[in-house]
Image (tube, rainbow, N blue to C red):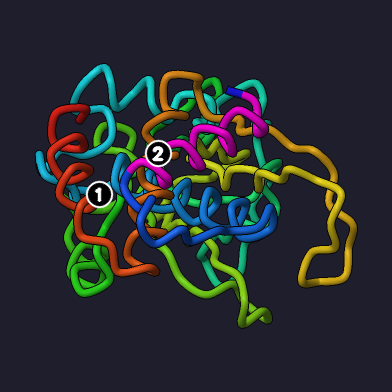
Amino acid sequence: MTISEMHYDFKVKLDKVASQTKEDFNVAEIDWLLNEAQDVFIKQRYGLNNPHRTGFEVTQKRIDDLSSLHVKQPEQVGITPTLTSGVYEVPLSSLTHTYLFYTRGSVDVTVTNCPTTTMQLRHIQADDLSDALRDPFNQSSITDGVLFNFGKSSGNLATTSIYIYPGTLTLGDVYIEYIKHPRQMFFGTYTYIDGSTTTLTNCELPEHTHSEMVDQAVLIASGIIEHPTYQQMKKQKVFNQE
């Protein structure tokens, strides 16, 4: 659907369940509801907070739902990490797109007298890191992958970095695959809350997800106007669609 069609679909569905209240949302408010619904939709598909308790890539539908947001090589080029006190850092702010959720990572590794090879990053929880670094069987290695976890970017309170613990390995470029933030949808022609003038911007998620996002937007709107009918309808529809 185009953004105009999503607005029309929203109005039809909301009018169907709230015709007696005659609640009306303006263009900017419908855009806000659609973008809020988009955020909810993505988080439900990536995580387990949904009726089926299934996460990203558990089913083909979930893979397809977020496919247009899943950034991989070659679109995301390798990033050269910064080495400080034996730990490599990759600020997620240096990615091509605005980072939302991590899916996979790898890194080039140089070993003496061997050609450079690419190895998988292996996530380690913060409370297990100290033990892993001391344990020769859990340290970063050619056979088991390279340890990493997440933390605040050095020198920047507002961003996140990946921290990589190489052990005796020498690392090169890091390759991150991730779900990016979707672009905001706008019907256009009005002034946004930051003072900018919005231009027509369609949803970038796959076409088959648009109706589901409109359903979610109407659910949010029905909560605002405290209309119970649609909430019951949507609960059953979401369960069937997922």
| Circles 1, 2 touching at the beta carbon (< 8 Å) | yes
Q: Quadrant of residue 53?
A: top left
- Horizontal side of 66 relative to 123 (left or right) equals right
SS assignment for the magenta stretch, majority? helix
Whether residue 117 is visible, yes or no, is no
Residue flagged by tag 1: what amino acid is it?
Answer: Tyr
Up-down relation of residue 148 to residue 38 (above or below): below
**Pick the front one: 233 or 40:** 233
- Residue 21, position in %: x, y? 39, 62
Residue flagged by tag 2: what amino acid is it?
Answer: Lys
- Horizontal side of 60 relative to 87 (left or right) equals left
Query: Of the residues under marks 1 and 2, which one precedes in the sequence?
Result: 2
- Which SS class for mark 1? helix
Q: On the image, numbered disc 2 is attached to which residue?
A: 13
- Residue 80, position in %: x, y? 68, 46
Determine crowd level at label 1: few under 14, some 14-19, many 20+ residues with C-alpha closer than 10 A: many
- Residue 27, position in %: x, y? 68, 52
Identify the residue at horizontal 50%, vertical 19% (top origin).
Answer: 207
**Pick the front one: 105 or 113:** 105
- Horizontal side of 23 relative to 202 (left or right) equals left
Q: Which residues are magenta?
A: 2-16
The stretch drawn in magenta includes residue 6:
yes
The stretch drawn in magenta includes residue 36:
no
- Residue 74, position in %: x, y? 64, 21
- Which SS class for mark 2? helix
Identify the residue at horizontal 62%, vertical 39% (top origin).
Answer: 173
Q: On the image, numbered disc 1 is attached to which residue?
A: 230
The Cα atoms of the two marked residues, 1 and 2, are separated by 9 Å
Q: Quadrant of residue 204?
A: top right
Identify the residue at horizontal 57%, vertical 50% (top origin).
Answer: 99
